[in-house]
Structure formats: structure tokens, C-alpha cells
Image (cartoon, rainbow, N blue to C red):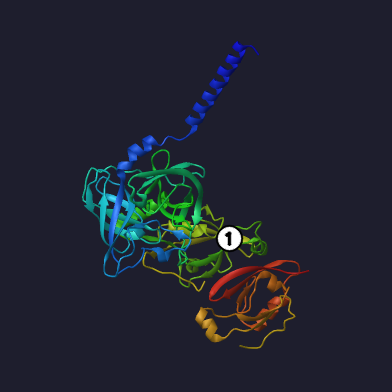
Amino acid sequence: MNPVNRMLTSVAVACVLLAYSALSAASLPEFREIVKKNSPAVVKIIVEQDTSVAPGHPGTDEIPEYLRRFFEFRGAPPPQHHEQMGMGSGFVISEDGYIVTNNHVVEGASSVLVRLSDRREFDAEVIGTDPRSDLALLRIEASDLPVLKLGKDGELEVGEWVLAIGSPFGLDYSVTAGIVSAKGRSLPTERNENYVPFIQTDVAINPGNSGGPLFNLDGEVVGVNSQIFTRSGGSIGLSFAIPVSVVRNVVEQLKADGRVTRGWLGVTIQDVDKNLAESFGLDRPRGALVVEVAPGGPADDAGLQSGDIILSFDGTEIPTSAQLPHVVGLETPGTEVVVEVMRDRKRKEIDVEVGGLGAEDGFSLTASGTATGQGGRLGALVEEAPAELLERWGINGGVLVREVAPDSVAAEAGVLPGDVITLIGSTPIKSVASYADVEAGLPAGGSVPLRLIRRGSPLFIGLKLGD
């Protein structure tokens, strides 16, 4: 190749590389305008807490050990009866001073100070808090404040770019970006409550980011940063934000009433695995299996039963049991909805009036005689359940599993000694005699659901019967 051609070739290659570089740069998101426009509405929240009232980090007893709420305390915990200072983030949602943050940022605080981007500081009033969603609404005496706009419900997609603004480790107005890793993550609290379908992102979130906004590329708030998954205390790329649908619902109620009431169905539920799906006549695992119904609750009043599989709620498909509390919790108490269930291998629609669960309300369902021979078809040695055990666990009948034969149907299904069997298929088990009758009539080669109580908590398992 002569020198002229070589030079022309080099120029052509350089042009291609420059064009590719420009195209790649153009395809990357632009954050500068979002930050410039929205950061003035992000605030720093400084709290003081009397450690004699609430030692340690607020709210940490409510979450599993591997999850951390990133609210930063400055310095080592001081002696009892001293004030302890902490910092979090928040954002303004109205020109007259309403501010959203996390409940755990202000929980137990003796004073709350809000610092704006222009360095003005205001004492904040806590309008209301909602521990179940980890949200709080504050207000400061100010006007003409810059505000953030809440995005639309349900428009965020996995893979979408998002960014966070907050004060990690006290470094005000730090900006980090990443993508949405997943939606609808269930992170039950230590009380096994699960009302928030968290947004999972890989945005770098650290102590001090608590309560700060998560933005989409339109500059709208799509979530409130709340928790991280960590083993070190810092970000490892697994952060969780409360979605805007929950934020909007909670904020409206806190603003109007100072408290939150969410929809309540009155059931304990579990997931449906492959064996249970087959035994209940489903083509695949899906839905929320009703393990127990609260007496006098909305589900009980509507006629829902233990053993029903909830397939949809008010037109929303329920793919897993974790999805049901998310959907029910957003319903207004008193609303009438249609619940589709699978019962006795047939689909059925049931009208339910949703009940209400207040912020302070708790709900929990405690989710010797002659024995049969161990040569039964299921391979379980059972006896009459003691009356005191039935009373303690709040059940009105059942048989106690004394032993389980190795390699039996019961053993393969996971039945354990100490379980109390209350239902086989759709037949209640009230005694050893009724257990023996049902066992003898089970069809060969099929699957049947079995309901039992284990250490006070109800559970369904699927039995696969031999030929």
C-alpha cells in the first residue's frame, strides 16, 4: 500500500472510531440537568435522640440482620441519658413545607432539624409516620420552596437508569446512578410484615442516604431510598427503594389524617410449589395459598376458606404469595373487590369487602390417644392431639404426628413428628378415626394437599401418592 493510501486508510479508521465514540456517548444518559434542576429540593435531616429512651439505631429491630437501613449516627454511641445525633435525607413535595423521609430517620427523635440546599435551617414538625412502609411526613414553616414531582405508578421498568441524591456519610448533595435491577422485591420485617414491593437497584447507597429520592431520567421521584443489603455496612450494589405508588398512598393519608390505614384481608398465606400446584389442580405453581382465615375478618365474612388459592385480587394477578399483601395494602378499607380462587380444582369468584389495618394494629394467626399403625399408606404414626395443645394453637381438631416412617409418602413430603394434621384434601381431620378413613380412600398415583400446624404456624404441603 502506497503512503497516500495508507494515510487515507488511517484517516478513515480514525473517523469511524470518532463516530462510534460520539454515538456511544450520545446513548449514555445525561444527568446534569436532572441534578441541577432537582437537587435544591433535596434536604438534609439532622435529628437528636435521647438514648435513654431509644438506645441504638432506630428501627433496626424491625428488619432482618442482613438488611441495613442507612441512617448515619455520628460517632460512637454515647452514655445513657445523653443526646445522640444522626443524619438522613429527605425531599420537599410542596411549596408550603411538606417533606418526605424515612420513618426510621425520625423514629424516637427528640428534635428534627431540616437543612435546605441554601443552608437555611428549620425545626421540623413530624406530621405522621408509618413504620410498616418506613415513611414519615414532616413540615417546616417556609414558603415558595422548590419541590419534586412524584412519578406515575407502575411506569418504572427493570433496566431503566435511575439516580439518587442524598447525604451519605454527611457529604451533602452527593449524586450516584445505576439501573433498576428488579421490582416487587419482598423484604419481610422481623414481624413478618410485607407491605412494600421494593425497587431493587445497583445505585451506590450508604449511611446518610436514608429518606432521599430516587429519580428517573425525567427527573421524577420514582422511589424513596430505604434499605441496603450489606455485610460490611457499606454499599455492595444492592439497594432498595420504596416505590412511588406506596409513597403517594402513605403521604396522602398522613397529610389528611396523620396516620395510615391500609387494606386488610385477614388470612395467613404461603407459596404454592410444584407438588402443591399439582395436588390443587393448577397447571403451574402460582397464587397465594390460604393457610388460615382470621375468625370474623374480611376473608371469613366473605366465605374464603383454608385451602383456597388466591389467583387474582381485584383484577390483579397474584403470581406469588408475596404479591398479595402489596396489592391488598394499597386498597382503601371498605372497598368491594372480586377475588378469584381455586377451590376443589375449580375456579371461583368471591366478592370481598376489604377491611382496614391501622398503624398500631397487630395481626397474627398462629400461622394423647390411640395411635394408628405405622403401616398406613402415608407412613405416619398419629394419635389424638392433646386438648391443651389444640387450645394453645387455637385449632379445633387434628391428629398429632408421633413418628414418620423413612422413605414413606409423609417423609418425602416433609411431614415431621410434632406436626398436627388438620386437613387432607378438602376433608377436615378431627380424630384418628377420620384420619384413617381419609387415608384409606386416597386415590392411587395422584397428589393431594395436606394442611398441618407446625410449632403453632399453619402450613400446606403436597403429598404424592404411590400407585
Residue type at the position of mark 1: Lys
Quadrant location of the N terminus in the rendered image = top right
231 in relation to 217, above or below: below
Furthest residue toward bottom: 369
Position in image of residue 347 (x %, y %): 60, 59
The residue positioned 33% from the left and 43% from the top of the image is 148
Furthest residue toward front: 3
The residue positioned 65% from the left and 59% from the top of the image is 282
Position in image of residue 83 (x %, y %): 26, 64
**Along the horizontal axis of the image, is 37 left or right of 64?**
left
Position in image of residue 411 (x %, y %): 69, 73
In the image shown, does 372 or 191 lie closer to the viewer? 191
The residue positioned 60% from the left and 57% from the top of the image is 286
Q: Is residue 60 visible?
A: yes
Q: Quadrant of residue 20?
A: top right
Secondary structure found at label 1: strand
Residue on which the image places disc 1: 348
Q: Is residue 314 visible?
A: no
How many numbered circles does the render carry? 1
445 in relation to 120, above or below: below
**Along the horizontal axis of the image, is 299 left or right of 107?**
right
Q: Residues within 10 Å of mark 1 (few under 14, many from 20)?
A: some
In the image shown, does 138 or 3 lie closer to the viewer? 3
Position in image of residue 152 (x %, y %): 42, 44
Quadrant location of the C terminus in the rendered image = bottom right
Furthest residue toward right: 467
In the image shown, does 427 or 177 lie closer to the viewer? 177
